[in-house]
Image (cartoon, rainbow, N blue to C red):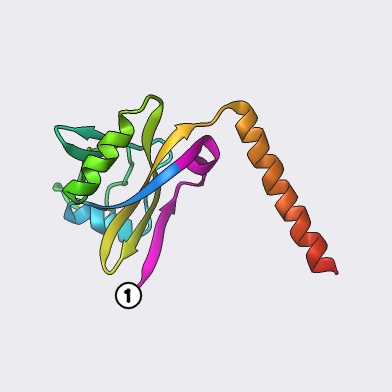
């Protein structure tokens, strides 16, 4: 079936230096899946953390399903992320380093299942963000120049 992007956290790559990425499955309820099929997801303020040797996704907002009933889900509930134990242990080791955090980069459908791309990132300083803007502007100008020739 391929990959269909639900939501992309572009601000994360601007605010964090991504060192490594990981793909994780997400444990969802029925109305959450239906809401995601409608393309509704806000993950700008969300993050992932390790609790009791398990990975969880916090502060992700999946709005309630419009045609749901009284059994609709809580939009901001904590969701469990599904990863292999070996990958989890490797990322727990990475997160022991000071200043690193797990940031959701992208949520997408892959073969009928919701996947979340997580990145291990370190927060950028203001001067790093300025350099990112400079590089982006230069690449845009370079493309215009090459296209004009």
For the point 71% across and 53% down, the residue is 139
Q: Where's residue 121, x and y in %?
A: 43, 37
In the image, is residue 57 above or below residue 32? above
Q: In what element is the residue under mark 1?
A: loop
For the point 50% across and 38% down, the residue is 17
Q: Where's residue 60, x and y in %?
A: 33, 41
148 within the magenta span: no
For the point 55% across and 40% down, the residue is 14
Seen in the image, is 48 located left or right of residue 72? right
Residue identified by numbered label 1: 1
Q: Find the magenta span and give its range.
A: 1-18
| Foreground of the two, 83 or 1 | 83
Q: Is residue 74 visible?
A: no
For the point 16% across and 36% down, the residue is 53
| Foreground of the two, 51 or 71 | 51
* Residue 54 found in image quarter: top left
């Amino acid at each position: 079936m391929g990959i269909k992007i639900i939501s992309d956290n572009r601000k994360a790559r601007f605010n964090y230096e991504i060192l490594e990425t990981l793909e994780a499955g997400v444990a969802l309820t029925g109305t959450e899946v239906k809401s995601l099929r409608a393309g509704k997801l806000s993950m700008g303020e969300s993050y992932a953390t390790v609790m009791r040797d398990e990975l969880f996704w916090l502060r992700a907002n999946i709005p309630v399903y419009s045609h749901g009933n009284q059994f609709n889900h809580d939009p901001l509930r904590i969701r469990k992320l599904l990863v292999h134990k070996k990958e989890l242990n490797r990322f727990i080791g990475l997160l022991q380093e000071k200043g690193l955090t797990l940031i959701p980069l992208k949520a997408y459908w892959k073969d009928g299942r919701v996947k979340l791309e997580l990145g291990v990132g370190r927060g950028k300083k203001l001067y790093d963000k300025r350099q990112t803007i400079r590089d982006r502007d230069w690449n845009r100008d370079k493309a215009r120049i090459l296209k004009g020739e």
